[in-house]
Structure formats: C-alpha cells, structure tokens
Image (cartoon, rainbow, N blue to C red):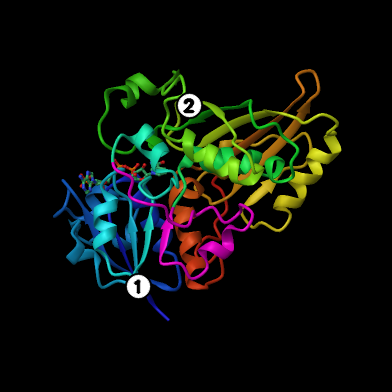
Amino acid sequence: MTISVAVSGASGYAGGEVLRILAAHPEVEIGAITAHSQAGQRLGSIAPHLHALADRVLVDTTVENLAGHDVVFLALPHGASAAVAAALPENTLVIDAGADHRLESAAAWEKFYGSEHAGFWPYGLPELPGQRQKLAGTKRVAVPGCYPTGAQLALAPGFAAGLLEADDVVIISASGTSGAGKSLKPHLLGSEAMGSMSTYGVGGSHRHIPEMEQGFSKLAGEEVTVSFTPTLAPMPRGILTTATAKVKPGVTAAQLREAWTEAYAHELFVHLLPEGQWPTTGAVLGSNHVQLQLAFDTHANRVIATAALDNLTKGTAGAAVQSMNIALGLEENTGLLMQGVAP
Ligand SMILES: NC(=O)c1ccc[n+]([C@@H]2O[C@H](COP(=O)([O-])OP(=O)(O)OC[C@H]3O[C@@H](n4cnc5c(N)ncnc54)[C@H](OP(=O)(O)O)[C@@H]3O)[C@@H](O)[C@H]2O)c1
C-alpha cells in the first residue's frame, strides 16, 4: 500500500520537518508540497537539507492542490488551517500541526486566541492514557503544541495516578529559536538571540497554558491550574522543560518513581532515564525521543520532573507522523526509527 501525502506550509520549519521524516517513510509517496509567499520556489533553494525533494516546486496552499491525497499535513500559522481543513473531504486523513483543533473548550480558545473556535479533534499525543484508541482509524488529528508535549509527558503519570495536587503546577521551559517559526523577527536574529536567554509570554498569557490544563485536568479528574513561563534559549532546536507540582500528603518517592516507570515502561519514544541521570536537549536532537527524569524535593514537598525533546520532531512533525501511523494502522514507529545526533 502506498499512501499519498500532501504537506502544506512546506516552506516553514514544521512543514520542512514533516518532509524530512516522510522522505524516509517506506509507505509514503509525497504529492503536493505547498507554501504561501514562497509558492513557485524550488524546495532545494529553501530547505537545502531535503536532498530527495530538492527539485520539487512549492505550489499554492489551496484546497484543490491538497485534496486527492490520502493524507494532508497542515503546518500553517494558527487560524489558517481551520478553513482549509473544513473544505477537505471527510475521508482524507488531515493532520493539523497548528493549534486550531487542540482545545475542547470554546471559551478557553476564545480567551487565549481571540478568534472563533474551530472545534476539537483527537489529540496526537499517544503516550497519554487512552489516547491511542482515539487516534486509531481517525480522519482528523490535532498535533499537540511543542511546550504542552514536554509538560504533559513530564507530569502525566503523577496526575493519572492521583499523586499530585491540582492547584499549584509550575512549568518553566527553555526553547530553541525554531519554535517561533522561520519568518523574520528582530528578536530572533543571530545577533540578538545568540549568547543570551530571555523570557517571553510571562504572566499567564501563553497560548499553550489551556492545552496543558486540559490534558492534566482530564487525567486528574479535577480542574488543574498551570503557571507557565517560556524562555528562549540560544540554540536552533530543543525544549528543556522543568515541571513541578505539590505532592499529595503521604506520597513517597518510591510511589512517584513507580508511577512514572510504569507509565512509560512500554513506550518507544518516551524514556525515563536511570535515577540520577538528567535529560539533555542534545541527546534527543533530530529524533522523536523524549527523555525524562524526576526527583522528589522533600524540602518543598514537590515533584520536579524534567523533559527534553526536539520541538520540531516529537514536538511537531514526529508526533504528526506517529499519529498518522496509528490512524492508518501502521506500526507506530514506521519512518521514525531515528536516533539522536551527537555531539
Ligand atoms: N516551530 C515549531 O517548533 C512548532 C512546534 C509545534 C507546532 N508548530 C505549529 O506549526 C505551524 C507552522 O509553524 P512553523 O514554525 O513551521 O512556522 P513557519 O516556519 O513560519 O512556517 C509557516 C508556513 O506557513 C505558510 N504561511 C504563512 N502564512 C500563511 C497563510 N496566511 N496561509 C497559508 N500559509 C501560510 C508559510 O509559507 P511561506 O513561507 O511561503 O510564506 C510557511 O510555509 C504553526 O501553527 C505552529 O504553531 C510549530
């Protein structure tokens, strides 16, 4: 079976990473690749690392160009994918790397995004309890945000096992600059971002907050509130998340470790490291793997969980392809057997 696939936003970072993975996927044939301002350009002039596709020409992101494929990946700015998705045939598998279909709550969407809610699709984080069943056979997938991927994987086992308090979750993440996309922004210029770290989206305003709260609340069975602060790190890729939450009375360090160990014991891409070894973004660069570690800070009565992932692979394109594999009934790691790149 050859699966025909179209990729929109192919001139951007997320779309380019989808293509990097799909170029090595044994079951896939890459059809239309689309762009916006860069339509008409040869892909090799924009993404010279994609050798196999260098002579392909980007076409306009229209429903006509995307329809007629078995699978369509949308890697468009948030707000741009809902209209395209709504016009695609119901039997096309549509995988949206943007935010448009991640939130169940229309009120949360309107508060954080300020536009009309487009609806909620099965959420492409199969490592969350019960999520694989929701992805199997689906024709629509909402790929998680990059920060919510790390944050949810870091604390999900504790909420699912009822070990954590819901009211005091604090998450600090450092992200590489590709997390902000490829369009030109002064604060992302090399001379601004290199050798310097900065905070942004401070004070409960970041759009990934409701997505984290949605995931944790479902697992905890009660409303979880999250304080989230992102920082920008001087590296092209990678996210290092430190997530902390208060531990319920009587919970022990052994119970915490057991919950995390059991949650990920059979996962191909999520790895709880041996005690004492801490995740690094360098170790997961270019791969679909996530490294985790936790400690029980008995002084503050908090669990400290850290997660390292590559924002463009497990944080976007890798999760998108992993979800495609599950939706189509392929082995979940098809095309994703990559190791990290070191040093
Ligand atoms: N970067 C990440 O780490 C990451 C992680 C998770 C999710 N995402 C999500 O993935 C999506 C793409 O992000 P990105 O980082 O790849 O951004 P990007 O590098 O800026 O790429 C944006 C892409 O969308 C196209 N585009 C721009 N305006 C458009 C419009 N009005 N209509 C249709 N296409 C348009 C661009 O085409 P031209 O270049 O031809 O103008 C480009 O191909 C976003 O929704 C983002 O939130 C990104």
Q: CA distance from mark 2 to mark 1?
A: 37 Å
Q: Position of residue 208 (x, y in %)?
A: 45, 36
The secondary structure that dominates the magenta segment is loop
In the rendered structure, the answer to whether residue 157 lies left or right of residue 118 reads: right
307 relative to 18, above or below:
above
**Camera-side residue of 302 and 41:** 302
Q: Quadrant of residue 19?
A: bottom left
In the rendered structure, the answer to whether residue 100 lies left or right of residue 80 reads: right
Q: Which mark is residue 230?
A: 2
Task: Identify the element where label 1 is drawn.
Answer: loop
227 relative to 315, above or below:
above
Q: Quadrant of the C terminus?
A: top right
Q: Quick check: which quadrant has ligand 1?
A: top left
**In this picture, which residue range is highlighted in magenta?**
116-142
**Camera-side residue of 150 and 300:** 300
Answer few, some or many: residues within 10 Å of disc 2's Cα (few below 14, many 20 plus, some between 14 and 19). many
Q: Quadrant of the N terminus?
A: bottom left
Residue at 57%, 32% in the rendered image: 241
Q: Amino acid at mark 1?
A: Asn
In the rendered structure, the answer to whether residue 48 lies left or right of residue 152 reads: left
Q: Quadrant of residue 161?
A: top right
